[in-house]
Image (cartoon, rainbow, N blue to C red):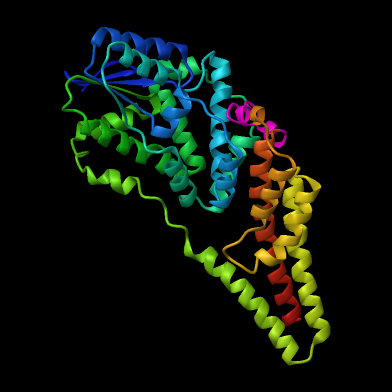
Amino acid sequence: MQEKNNNILEIDENLRIIGTAHVSSKSVKLVEEEIEKWKPDLVAVELCESRMKSLTEPSELESEDLLKIIGDGRATMILLQSALGTLQRKMGEAAGEKPGAEFLAAIRSAEKIRVPIELIDRDIVITLRRAWAKMGLIEKWRVMNALLWDDEDDEVSIEEMLENSDLLNTLLEDAKKVAPKAGKVLIDERDEYLATKINRVRGSGKVLAVIGAGHLSGVGSFLEDGENNQFDRIEELNLQPRKPLWPKLVMTAIPLFLFGAIGWMFYNGQMENLSDTIGEWVIWNSAFAALGIIIARGHPLSVIVGAIASPLTSLNPTLAAGWFAGYTQLKIDSPTGKDAKDFLVLDEYSLLWKNRVGKVLLVTALGNLGSTVGAWLAVGDIIGNILG
């Protein structure tokens, strides 16, 4: 394996890998020049089908899509993906390029010389779900804080990162310190995934792979070791994470506990305590579900619907108050076509509260979070009253 410069690895005479900065005009030029001069037989690009489509065929989010997102419980994942996209767009504005411009350049250059394109990245939704599932509450808080609220200016320019892939690796390692479990999924797993996918197409003649510079070292190491031939690892790395069992058990135990407490009080003739228990359950659930929706700046009717639904949905693990509030928000303050387009190119996190699509998702996610917190606090309050 030879390193032509900081951003190109020559694995052998038939495999060359370019490491790019995702929002750099210099990366775009580098990719175009390498494809034109080297004339590969296949171009492998660090994209998945959904990211490829978003780059080449920008689409809108229709109301039916939003309803499906709400019903499938994917509001949080879409918001996280949007936050990541916003971060990249901010970087792109500073560098003068749109995120993914170098991948688009690779695709168009490959089409120009009429060679096939291979998508070698894992689906973005699977990656985010695996990362989110591995993180604990503290890591999730750190990640959301870094994405949404940490406005510290980064002293390292995009061009500096392109010139020095080791610098970009250092930045990625720093990110792993903030969220080590997520870092393993976002960096280490994807290094292995990309290397395995590249190995699968190495018999296609001259292969030029275009990947992020932060993956260059890791992918190169996998390919150099020669141990990345376990094709079944792709299937393993594509597995959707199983939802942890304990939240479902807890949310099932909560209504059982509540009904048990009510039955015990009724049996013992403690009608005053019974009334207080029901009241506490309703107040805690309604108050925190409403608070979450208010923080999302939901419509007053969405707040009311979420507050009414929460005491009932908390008794059924298959339902969530945020779904009802989000559906209400969607119907009362329906997103326009412009909202749908603008949501896909948000350049400021604060616009989530102003964009109607973003607000529907926030109302759903924060309504669910508030309802869950309210149910837990209600149980704690009721236990305190019983023990007292």
Dividing the picture into quadrants, the one containing residue 197 is top left
Q: Is residue 337 left or right of residue 193?
A: right
Residue at image point 33% right, 45% down: 237
Q: How many marks?
A: 0
Residue 70 forms part of the magenta stretch? no
- Please identify the dominant SS of the magenta region: helix
Q: Is residue 89 left or right of residue 199?
A: right
Q: Residues in magenta?
A: 340-354
Residue 144 to residue 286: above or below: above
Q: Residue furthest right?
A: 272
For the residue pair 225 and 200, the one nearer the viewer reads as 200
Residue 179 to residue 37: above or below: below
Q: Is residue 40 left or right of residue 358?
A: left
**Which quarter of the rendering shows the C terminus?**
bottom right
Residue 316 to residue 326: above or below: below
Q: Residue furthest bottom?
A: 268
Does residue 279 appear anywhere in the picture?
yes
Residue 351 forms part of the magenta stretch? yes
Residue at image point 77% right, 52% down: 303
For the residue pair 115 and 36, the one nearer the viewer reads as 115
Residue 125, position as x, y percentages in the image: 46, 41
Does residue 164 appear anywhere in the picture?
no
For the residue pair 158 and 205, the one nearer the viewer reads as 205
**Which quarter of the rendering shows the N terminus?**
top left
For the residue pair 55 and 195, the one nearer the viewer reads as 55
Residue at image point 69% right, 66% down: 312
Residue 4, position as x, y percentages in the image: 27, 14
Residue 286 to residue 137: above or below: below
Residue at image point 63% right, 27% down: 342
